[in-house]
Image (tube, rainbow, N blue to C red):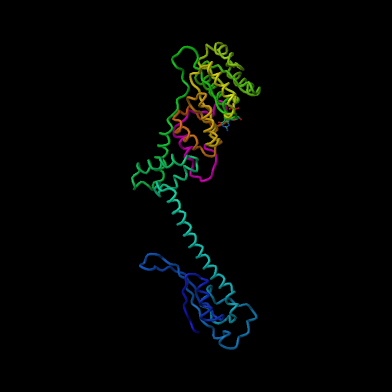
Amino acid sequence: MDLKTFQAPTMSEALAEVKSTLGPGAVILHTRTFSRRGWLGLRRQEIVEITAGRSGNSGDRGARRPIPSRPRPSPLIAAPDRPLGMLSNSRQILESPAAQSAAMLGLTQEMTNIKGLVQDLVEQTRQQRLPNIPAEYHALYSRLVRNQVCQNLAADMIQTLHRQIRPEHARQSDFIRDKLLEQIEKLLPLGSPLVRGTKMGPHVVALIGPTGVGKTTTLAKLAANLKIRERCRVGMITLDTYRIAAIDQLGKYADLIESPLKVVSRPEEMSAALQAMKDCQFVLIDTAGRSPNDAMKLGELRSFLAVARPDEVHLVLSSTSSQQCVELALDRFGKVRSDKIIFTKLDEAAHCGVVLNIIRKTNKSLSYITTGQDVPKDIEVGGGRRLAQMILGSDDLGGGACQ
Ligand SMILES: Nc1nc2c(ncn2[C@@H]2O[C@H](COP(=O)(O)OP(=O)(O)O)[C@@H](O)[C@H]2O)c(=O)[nH]1
Ligand SMILES: [Mg+2]
């Protein structure tokens, strides 16, 4: 038999060469792929090699042998040392399972090459998109952005990290994670819990914010903690006159902790309500869940607060809201007054980056975060390592609540 070796960059090209040189009666004895250094040894190139021969019985040499009545095992790749020339029919050869698996081998090889090319392309695009992020920190940067930390802030944090970390530590993922958590913690100074000032009379705190963010629930948590843990005398005032259910909601908690609750429906009633609670150490004011778009009602809220003259106004925001909604609320309620920020529902938020973005943007203190519906348990002072961990998220790439 006339044996020849054919080399080509792909299986299909190699097969085509076999066919054109040896004719359709070619018998493939062996295939292999290997890589070869290219010009100047710079790039490696994949090569497919086929060893094939022309069978003595092939159609262009003479009379055909009858096709065996029983299908015979292929003499091709699977068993290269089988007697040659068993398959004389060229179609049979090229369509035989062995030829097909040779073609599959070629396809797999091509897929691997394409995958490599796509990976190179992704890395190149990333490098173009993130020119300021060193390659070894791309994954961490992407993780911050995926957790909704805004891109500029994430880039600043990574650059600070890059400056802090010596190259020999750049691959120690636990060490780097720790340094990043430290940085987040510094960006979110620990909020201080409610404390009475030195003035006489009650320390008055108002919670304001959009509807449904958790103002009433948070107020109940604060009141219960002050009363039960710190044994303070606490009074509550609600302006939530729009929804009877809301008054009932707070009334239930007021009963439970045996503290007074006053309902104030007009600014003129505010002074009397405060006067009635003059012996309390803290008075917490719950406000109606006004929409940040409702200018008239925000004006009304302002006039209630003008009379109450609270010592502190906390803007309550939900970490489940989009950055855009939170910014809108900040803008509108900021015009009323907001000294500190409370972020609620961290247990429900898929990503907690918004907390970091907003605290950095406003430079206000994060007084509390809330992490569930349980009164009084699910509230903690804002900041600290646990919050930093919620913001950075777990290694799990999927979404999920921050806790
Ligand atoms: N998962 C979760 N739900 C909360 C949290 N705080 C409040 N809620 C729920 O959010 C809903 C609205 O709360 P509410 O206090 O009435 O909101 P308000 O309209 O701002 O007074 C209620 O179902 C609360 O139980 C929290 O931290 N986590
Ligand atoms: Mg409410």
Q: Nearer the viewer, residue 300 or 245?
A: 300
Q: Is residue 263 visible?
A: no
Q: Is residue 69 magenta?
A: no
Which quarter of the figure has residue 47? Answer: bottom left
Which quarter of the figure has residue 361? Answer: top left
Q: Main secondary structure of the magenta part?
A: loop
Which residue is depicted at the point 50% across and 18% down? 310
> Residues in magenta?
374-403
Residue 360 rendering spot, x and y as whole percentages = 44, 33
Q: Is residue 382 magenta?
A: yes
Which residue is depicted at the point 44% across and 49% down? 129
Task: Look at the picture and state if 50 lies above or below 294.
Answer: below
Q: Is residue 100 visible?
A: yes
| Residue furthest bottom as drawn | 62
Count up the numbered dots: 0
- Quadrant containing ligand 2 reads top right
Residue 201 rendering spot, x and y as whole percentages = 49, 12
Task: Look at the picture and state if 277 lies above or below 401.
Answer: above
Q: Nearer the viewer, residue 326 or 41?
A: 326
Q: Nearer the viewer, residue 86 or 317?
A: 317
Residue 317 rendering spot, x and y as whole percentages = 53, 30
| Residue furthest front as drawn | 296
Residue 372 rendering spot, x and y as whole percentages = 56, 31
